[in-house]
Each structure stands twice: as C-alpha cells, then as structure tokens.
Image (cartoon, rainbow, N blue to C red):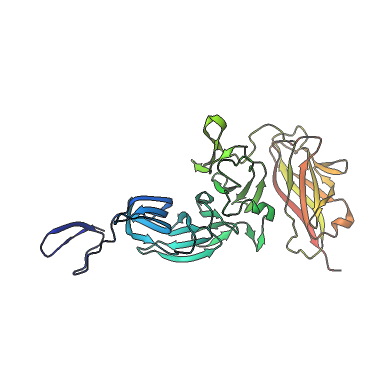
C-alpha cells in the first residue's frame, strides 16, 4: 500500500504521510502519530507485523501511559514503529495483565494471568475468536512455540494449540494422567516459576519445576514424549545449579546455569545416560492400571518386559514386584517364566541374550488368590538393595496379559 500526501485547497503541502488515500472533506485525524519511548514485556511477529503486549509508551501529547492489558501492532515490515491507532483491545479492564504473546499460523495467542484469548489476525482487522478461562499462565517462559503448535502451562493443565484446537496433554479419555502431588509442583500460579523446554531431536517436551536464581532444590522434571504420547516423571534429572529458562538452538535443548564464580554456562540436555557410572538408587513405578474397567475383577496371567543393555556381561540387578488395588504398602512378588531368576523371593531380570538387542523377561504373579482378584495393578522395578543398576539398562515396553472375570 503506497503512502499518500494530502493537498489542501491552497495547494500547500501538509507534509504528513497517510497509510490510506484521504477522503474528500474528511476532518483531519491526528490519532495515528507514532508512539515514543515504547517498551513492552512480551512480543511476537505475525504476518510481517510485530505485536507487543503489556506496554509502556509516550503518546503524541507527551503523556506517559502504561497499558498492562493492551496490544499494539507495528506497521507492516516496520517492527519498531507503533502508532496510537494501532492498539488492539479484545479484553480490557478485567483485572488481568498480559503475561505472554505467542502465535501459530494466523492466530495470535494472548495469555493473561487466568485467561487465554485467541485472536484471528488473518485480515486487516483483528477480532477475538475465542476466550478460555483458567488457561492463562504466569510468565513468558512458561510458553513455548513448537513445530506443531504452541505449548504452555496453565492452572488446569499443560496444553497444546495446533492452530485449530486446544488439547490438554495431562488428560486422556477424561482421566488425569499425573498425580495431584506431582501436578501441584508445576501448575501455573502467582508464585510459580515452572518453565518449558523442547528437545526437537527426540520430540520431547521438558517441564521444569522452577527456573531462576535460588532454584537449586528443584531438580525434578516432567517429560512428555510426542511419539509415545506418554509422560515420564524425572526425579533429580537436573544438576544442582541456578537455572535460567531453557532455549532450543540448532535442534538441541540447552539449559543456562549460574555456576559459582564461572559465570553463566550452557548445558546440553541429554535424553539418555551419558555416564558409565552405575546407579545405586533406581525405582520405576507405573501408574495404577485398571484396564478400563475399575469395578471389575481381573486375573493377571503374565507380564512381559522388553529390555536391552549394551553388553551381556554382568548382572542387570533390576528386580520386579507389583502392587494391587492401589495399596502401595504391600508389594507382591512374581514367579519367573523366562529371562529372570529369583533372588530370594523377588524376581530379578537376567542379562539380555544378545548385547544391544532386545530380550523379553516374562513374569507371572506367584500368589494365585491375589492374581485372580485384581481390580488394578502397578508394576514396580527397582535396584537390588545390595547391588547397583547397569547404567545401560533400557526398557522398550511393558505388556500385561489379563482376563476380566465375571461378577460373583
């Protein structure tokens, strides 16, 4: 669109540039002057325009104003030029401030403390497409743009917007996929410092419990695998350092940390073990499987664990037990079918048949009266208390064979 100059009847040039052709005898409008001293807390670029939110600026009258819930858009291809008339107000005076702006496709996502507004910016005039209560977030570092959408942490979940719909990643089939205790440490609030990172090589979303100075005690993470559609609770997965918000660069995830007197250092996120040290502490407890029928008794026939290690020499030292009906105070034992031996009364996985190739350990509940009256089941894998776990031990999948029983 070319700029147009208005010529008055006396043929004296006003020297002012307009974005659109003037209309004859229209009153001169002075509301499109450039803002000065513009500062903002969050920004994103959509359709060759910059959108800024939670803004502080000086208007044409010299008045300094703050717009905590207002958005300004720049002129096309002029990402540092903002005008008074370019203000977008889709939801104002609601007591909330803008915490983050993000975008995907032709949708602008306006995050506030408690509310998410999705704004359609496909045309010259933007409009509010939808508003979502309780889906706001606490800070800009709790929102991340992915190759398949925008992810963020809210009060009620960890969400993904793919340009068409919002999906809560911690819910599936109407069921909550995390424990309440775990979720309380990550959910968005006025005091939360939780943050998101993305590992594009492994397509994993990493949820950090806290970032910022003084966060050395929060070394736990949550890991969401897009390929498997599964969550992993990573206890003590981070080093004890003051961490900044993670960044993705050159297809790798990096975490910046304040390392004593050495200044800020970058650490690459590793999804697999890099150390050759064996671990003396390890425990994996699955969720409580009710197999889609919580009120129906089941008979558990067998449990298949597919695993591998880097070599066949040396014991794996991983033992297996299970809990029934949500009772984690009483562990039950397995009998061995194949690729395992009994260490006392506890089944222990054998070294694989071939190095770097998967073997299958087959177990079955040892007590007949228990395995025939199970409503739900949790599998527990842990290190033999007198040994250390092989660092190269990997689990590919776990399969439980069961049969529903007729009501008595």
Residue 176, given in percent of the width and then of the height, sits at 66, 59
User: What residue lies at 67% left-to-right and 31% top-to-bottom?
Assistant: 276
Image vertical order of residue 276 relative to residue 237, above or below: above
Residue 74, given in percent of the width and then of the height, sits at 34, 55
Q: Does any portion of residue 254 appear in the rendered image?
A: yes
User: What residue lies at 62% left-to-right and 48% top-to-bottom?
Assistant: 223
Q: Quadrant of the C terminus?
A: bottom right
In this orientation, which residue lies closer to the viewer: 264 or 400? 264
Q: Quadrant of the N terminus?
A: bottom left
Q: Does any portion of residue 75 appear in the rendered image?
A: no
In this orientation, which residue lies closer to the viewer: 158 or 29? 29
In this orientation, which residue lies closer to the viewer: 13 or 357? 13
User: Quick one: which residue is furthest to the left in this view?
Assistant: 10
User: What residue lies at 71% left-to-right and 39% top-to-bottom?
Assistant: 393
Q: Quadrant of residue 317?
A: top right
Residue 108, given in percent of the width and then of the height, sits at 44, 58
Q: How many marks?
A: 0
User: Quick one: which residue is furthest to the top in this view?
Assistant: 261
Q: Quadrant of residue 59?
A: bottom left
Residue 133, given in percent of the width and then of the height, sits at 54, 64
297 relative to 81 in the view: left or right: right
297 relative to 6 in the view: left or right: right
């Amino acid at each position: 669109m070319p700029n147009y100059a208005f010529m008055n009847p006396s043929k004296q040039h006003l020297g002012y540039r307009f974005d659109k052709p003037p209309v004859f005898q229209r009153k001169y409008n002075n509301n499109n002057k450039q803002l000065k001293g513009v500062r903002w807390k969050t920004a994103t670029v959509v359709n060759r325009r910059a959108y800024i939110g939670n803004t502080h600026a000086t208007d044409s009258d010299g008045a300094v104003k703050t717009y905590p819930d207002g958005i300004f858009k720049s002129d096309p291809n002029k990402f540092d030029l903002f005008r008074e008339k370019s203000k977008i107000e889709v939801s104002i005076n609601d007591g909330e401030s803008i915490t983050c702006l993000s975008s995907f496709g032709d949708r602008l996502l306006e995050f506030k403390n408690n509310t998410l507004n999705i704004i359609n910016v496909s045309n010259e005039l933007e409009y509010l497409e939808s508003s979502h209560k309780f889906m706001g977030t606490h800070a800009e570092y709790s929102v991340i743009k992915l190759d398949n959408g925008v992810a963020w942490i809210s009060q009620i979940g960890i969400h993904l917007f793919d340009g068409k719909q919002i999906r809560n990643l911690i819910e599936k089939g109407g069921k909550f996929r995390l424990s309440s205790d775990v979720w309380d440490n990550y959910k968005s609030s006025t005091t939360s410092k939780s943050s998101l990172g993305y590992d594009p090589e492994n397509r994993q979303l990493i949820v950090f419990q806290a970032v910022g100075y003084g966060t050395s005690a929060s070394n736990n993470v949550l890991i969401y695998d897009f390929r498997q559609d599964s969550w992993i609770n990573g206890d003590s997965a981070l080093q004890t350092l003051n961490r900044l918000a993670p960044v993705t660069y050159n297809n790798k995830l990096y975490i910046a940390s304040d390392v004593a007197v050495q200044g800020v250092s970058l650490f690459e996120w590793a999804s697999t073990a890099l150390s050759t040290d064996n671990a003396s502490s390890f425990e994996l407890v699955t969720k409580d499987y009710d197999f889609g029928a919580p009120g129906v008794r089941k008979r558990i026939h067998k449990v298949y664990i597919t695993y591998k290690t880097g070599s066949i020499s040396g014991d794996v030292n991983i033992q297996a037990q299970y809990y029934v009906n949500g009772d984690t105070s009483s562990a039950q034992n397995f009998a061995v079918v194949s690729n395992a031996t009994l260490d006392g009364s506890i089944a222990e996985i054998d070294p694989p048949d071939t190095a770097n190739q998967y073997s299958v350990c087959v177990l079955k509940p040892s007590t007949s009266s228990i395995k025939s009256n199970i409503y739900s089941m949790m599998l527990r894998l842990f290190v033999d208390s007198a040994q250390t776990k092989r660092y190269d031990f990997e689990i590919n999948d776990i399969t439980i064979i069961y049969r529903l029983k007729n009501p008595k």
